[in-house]
Image (spheres, rainbow, N blue to C red):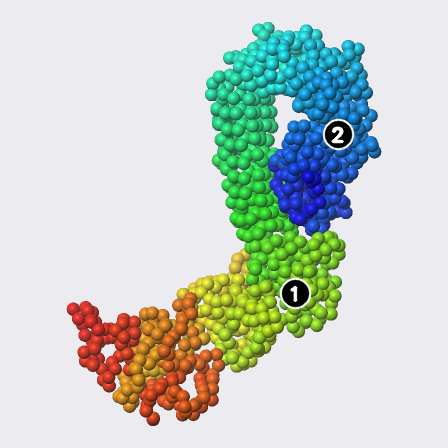
Amino acid sequence: MEININNISMRKTKLLFMVLLLTAIPNFLWAYTKDQIVSFDNEQTHYQVIQPDGNGVQPTLRFLSTKKAGPLVIPEKIGDNKGVTFTVVAVGSQGGYTSKDVTSVTLPNTIKDLGINCFSGATNLESINIPASVETINPLAFGDLRTVPVFEVADGNQHFTSDNNGVLYSRDKKTLWNVPTAIATKVNSDTYNVDQNVTKINRGAFPAHAELKKIVLPAGLQEVEQVYPPIATTNTLTEFEISSNNPTFKVDGGVLFNKTKKELVCYPRAKTTVDYKVPNEITSIGQYGIMNTDNIISLDLNKVEKTTSNSVYGARNLQTITIPAGLKKDGLKEGAFVACDKINEYKVANDNPDFIAVDGVVYSKIKDKLFFYPPSKTGASYAIPETVKEIAAQSFQAASNLTSITIPKTVEKVGKAAFRNMSNIETVTFEKPSSTTTLEQAAFRGCEKLKTVTLPATITELNDVFNGCKELETVTMPANSKLKTIRPNVFTTNKKLKTFKFEGNCDLETIEENAFANAESLESFNMPKSVTNIKRNAFSGCTNMKTATFDKDAVIQKIGSGAFADCGLESLDIPKNVKEIEKEAFRNCGALEKIKIEKYTTKIHPEAFKYCDKLTEINVDKENTVYSSVDGYLLSQDKEELIIFPPGKANDKFTLLPPSIKKIGDYSFLDCRKLKNVIIPNKVESIGKRAFGLCKNLSLITFLCDKVIPAANINTNQNEMSFDDGRDAPDMFKHITIHVRKDLYDNYKAIPFYKKFKGGIIEQSFFVGNEEYIPVSETVADLLKTTSTDHTFVLPTSVTHPVNGKRYHVNLIGDYAFQNTTAAVKEVVVKKNIEYIGAQAFVTNITDNTSTVKNVFFIESNPTKKMLSTTRFELDDTKKNYSEFASTTHIYVKKSALSKYQSEWKKEVYDLDTHGYQPSLFNFIDQIDYKIPGVTISKKYGTFAREFDTDFGVYYAEKHTHDIGAFVAKNSDVKQGPGDYGTSNYHVSMTSVDVNGGVKGKYGYVPANTGVLLKVLKEVSTPTDFYYAIGEEDNVERTVTNNIMTGITVNPQKVDYTASGDPMYVMQGGLFQKVTQTIPTFPIHKAYAKISSVPAGAKISFSFWDDNSATGITAIETEKEADKVYYNLNGQRVEKPQRGVYIQGGRKIIIK
């Protein structure tokens, strides 16, 4: 199987493991940054950005890894399918990215550089080609492979060549670069003769698994690299051989030496000697001269006078080293003996003038510096003497028995890797007051059980000291810490770090690149006041960090690129002194919902909050001179340009933009993954560079513009286009439907640019009856305008498109929606479905700001600021009255919602002189009430109907007088005799609404569109201040049964008289009077009755039937009230009265 990485479908940003990210800000698509790790095939193959796109240069990549198996073919070029095509020019590595299953590699002729640890982790890489384009190969390019491949270098390469055995050389063959692991098979021998042309051998030239026992070096060899790794890491190697005529090198006992330097160069790993004594003439051991040998048990340094760091490394069975008299302080380097895990004692010759050994531990003669601690020394703790001022580099490395260590207050310096790879150390304590000012790099590296560290207050810089401490949970900085800088990559490997805390004041100024990157367990961070700079990627990948807290007087001025990218931040107040927020500073903070921008922040990159899918509010200080915000949108100071669209505002129903904007700014929506629809508001005149680029899910745009946006004002230049047309990224036009106002339809249709949208079809607004609607998403339409003549206009909850039959929810009322309506419309009923009401929506005369609409009823119980354009978009700041309601319009809401309406719809404007908010001149909260007047009953009875649920019990509940009952159903045929009020020959028995499908227990509650007979229960008439309210029990639709009442709603209606049907009766003077002719205009919000079996000419009054329940309103069913019938004080009949106060025969009765 061949891996061909050309099938590209997507790009996903990955976090770096131990590398600096995001170091450049390109000007093209704003899509990539230097060192960013990307994938184009669903995370199977990864590359690293070398040169980002833009600035007139060719974007380039470095190949990192693949998860695929088999032969690997790396492409010359690779596109992201979003407008950028990269050239692959290098191969390299990053921690955590491996290619373990690759078996062969074909490099393209664009590769120039092979970096360190290419194809990291590959266990069976057999072959690789080196094309002519390759210019540099790192000596460690193949250092992380189980098998080094056979090389085949292209003939045209000017820098490298290979031989028939697959060995890699410099072009002139004078430098041996790499020998393949399969060399023994290639030469059919365990002895390998290096080409006689070779004068230099690179480090790591002979791999660990080459199965060679002997290497014959060329007579002309002049140079051997002596850094990690040595030239031969071959595990089976027992000896070298070289001509005795070589002027520089010699071999003694199979060991390679430098004659000129008198230095041990390379000790064969498989040499069988147990007790090794360095030859008399040798006075130094080079770096990694003795490395990873298992056979040496004792080592006699003999005449050695000089070492380097890691002269003896990984001699796994070495137990004792004696430092001879001639190895003095100028010759014995720190870390000379490292990772020799079985050393239990160091010894020092008695006549050595500079060193002593105390209990096997090596110190300087006066014990002010600790040099070597035996890795196998017994004891779980060790008390470092208080004479010690310095702990040397690598001095405790691999000391596996220690579980805790206390560093005395006298120690001033801890050297590089001093406590590295101490496998059981759990706690480190610096005695107070500590004198330690220097903690060098890797001081605690690889201490896998280390959990807690309290650092000294005296250090000024924190380096990469905890790399590989995978259990580290808590780091504490004491009060009055002098720490000024946290250096790059300090905590990138500490996945369990939960807490980095400051116990008091700290001088911290700079948190450098990647300092806490990928510390995914870090929960919070309290920034010291003194921090001035948080650099690129500093906290990137801290996925559990919910809060980053800044002092109110923090001096920080810049937040770097990617500083908080991929964090768990939920909200953040940017410190007041921050002037700049760089690119992707908060990229992919998936929980971030709100961010506050202070007055001095004057430079914000358009992609600062990229992929913050829940971000809905960017709130800018009112005194900021560059930016402003309304409804969480970041705008220019004059509110005329949209700078950043918060991704969380994208809404499946509809996506609104501030009505004040004239320009949709450059990059404002770029790569907004959640955006599916958007409404372009009235004043927009232009759309900037890449404004909607890469918005792959955008499918509908509604243009509400007063005028058509000229095509010339929408960027169509390559690499800058507002909408992708297929040249740089997938064609967006074919997926986007546009809707425009009907009156501008012909104008749009005449412009070729707009014909590029889906199918070349421009959709226009549509009419249903007297109302014009325009779709704003796949499911929602906006009421643009109405020319209704209804007395009470009930806004529909949904409409059906008259042409395509598509059903839309009506969730928006547009700006000026009622300006063309007739004077006949006196009321508007707004149901729960409305989520937004545009500017001056209910104003019928825009010029005078007046309205013939007298009442607007809101059924919604949970109002928000976002419901009104003036509160959502702070339109009162313009000092122009855009209020949705004229000052003469009454606004009625539910009683339970009144306080919230008054709170949410209260309007304030910011006063720059007082630096605070003041009440707006255009407030209308005093027009909001729940008490609906207009029902007057003068003679006991009246009729009623409404377009919404109503509650007549509210007056009695608050005033304790004038209770009202609503009746609907006839209980029996008409009977002779008067009823309970007035004079009549006949009466009809009726039951209340609550026992006929209404709200149980609420006899004064009238469901929407239900005609009822109203009765003032104890009094004869209603008072002048009587009111009712919108019903609160409208969560279910109710069906009233057996109703003889017919209500009139929406408009007065003609009621036709028919002699053959049931007689119709209307209420007059407290009695039903029979209708004998057609009524041309029956009053709105009244009701009439249809009653059968009534004698001709009869006047009918009422009695009220008792159904033996506690809910129905009851009265007697005879001509006069029976003396034995009891009523409670609510007028309800009671069959078996208990203790209490009752009415009987018109008198108050007390039963004890």
Q: Amino acid at mark 2?
A: Phe
Q: Mark 1 or mark 2, which is nearer to you?
A: 2
Q: Quadrant of residue 159?
A: top right
The local crowd at label 1, few if under 14, some if 14 to 19, many if 20 or more residues have their Cα within 10 Å, is many
Q: Observer-nearest residue: 971 or 485?
A: 971
Residue placed under numbered mark 2 in the picture? 151
Q: Is residue 1023 visible?
A: no
Q: Is residue 1087 visible?
A: yes
First-in-chain label (1 vs 2):
2
Specify whether 1072 is left or right of 294.
Answer: left
- Where residue 815 appears, as percent x and y from the top left, is 58, 69
- Quadrant of the snapshot with the N terminus: top right
- Where residue 408 appears, as percent x and y from the top left, is 50, 22
- Where residue 272 appears, as percent x and y from the top left, is 63, 12
Specify whether 147 is left or right of 438.
Answer: right
Q: Observer-nearest residue: 504 or 710?
A: 710
Residue placed under numbered mark 1 in the picture? 738
Marks 1 and 2 sit apart, C-alpha to C-alpha, by: 58 Å
Q: Is residue 382 above or below residue 489?
A: above
Residue lying furthest left in this view? 1152
The local crowd at label 2, few if under 14, some if 14 to 19, many if 20 or more residues have their Cα within 10 Å, is many
Q: Observer-nearest residue: 937 or 1128?
A: 1128
Q: Is residue 474 above or below residue 307?
A: below
- Where residue 466 appears, as percent x and y from the top left, is 56, 30
Q: Amino acid at mark 1?
A: Ile
Residue that appears at 35% across and 77% down: 966
